[in-house]
Amino acid sequence: MRINIFDYFKDHTMKRSTLLLSILLASSLYAADQKSATKPADVKMEGISYIKKLGSTLKNELQKHMKADPTAVAAFGFCTAKAMEITEEVNKELPPHASVRRTALKTRNESNAPDATDIKVMEAYVKAIEEKQFSPKDIKIGEEGNVTRVHKPLRTGGGCLKCHGGNGSKELKEMMTARYPKDQAIGYKEGDLRGVIVAEIKE
């Protein structure tokens, strides 16, 4: 049996090309799967880092004012004058594709009003608290178009009740009424969901 050398090399080259194409395709699919598998974890950690940055900055300042003035008048003054400003400053330090903010089902400052997605997430947290299945480590991640949201819950602590429990001093109540006539963020009990900090990350 005679073998045509040209047919041999043609067939051999085609087989090698097919094999190479298969390897490249498999590699691309594997890389895509790996990217898909790691993306949620990567975005979650990125979002948490921004949430911690805002949360710790506000918490440290608030605790400092509460310690200086146990009546919480100074803390209320700080929140009124500086909380939004600090939020803006933190956002300026983040990458262009990211932002972070606070919101709640019952807001004091209307600038912190939640949208439909925020409400749905917070209602799920409230339900978990009522059913005693809540964990403060329950970070929720959702995608809307090219934006990924990372929500971290905030529960009401004992120190929060002076401004949010409705049991503050007369002076404090008068200040809150004057500054926020449409205030909804009162009537909380310790352990209630106070709100969430939300990081938004664009692809």
Image (cartoon, rainbow, N blue to C red):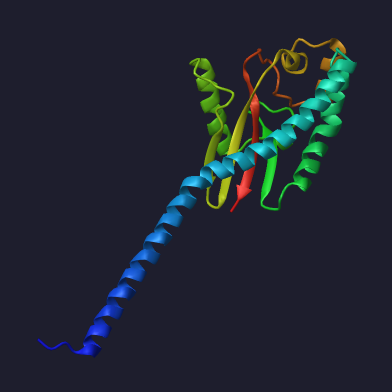
- Give percent across and percent down for residue 71: 86, 12
Is residue 64 at all visible to an observer of this figure? yes
The answer, for residue 110, to whether it is visible in the render is no
Horizontal side of residue 139 vs 113, given as left or right: left
Relative to 199, say whether 178 is above or below.
above
Of 174 and 38, which appears nearest the observer? 38
Residue lying at the far left of the rendered structure: 1
Expressed as whole percent of the image width and height from the top left, the position of residue 1 reads: 9, 86
**At which x and y percent is residue 185?**
70, 22
Q: At 53% across and 33% down in the image, what residue appears?
A: 120
Q: Quadrant of the C terminus?
A: bottom right
Residue drawn 77% across the image and 46% down it: 93
Q: Quadrant of residue 111?
A: top right
Q: Residue at x 37, y 60 (%)?
A: 26
Q: Is residue 6 above or below residue 56?
A: below
Query: 32 or 67, which lies in front?
Result: 32
| Res 173 → quadrant | top right
Asked whether, in this view, residue 144 is left or right of residue 165, the answer is left
User: Image point 86% across, 16% down: which residue?
Assistant: 67
| Quadrant position of residue 51 | top right
Residue 106, percent from left and from top? 66, 26
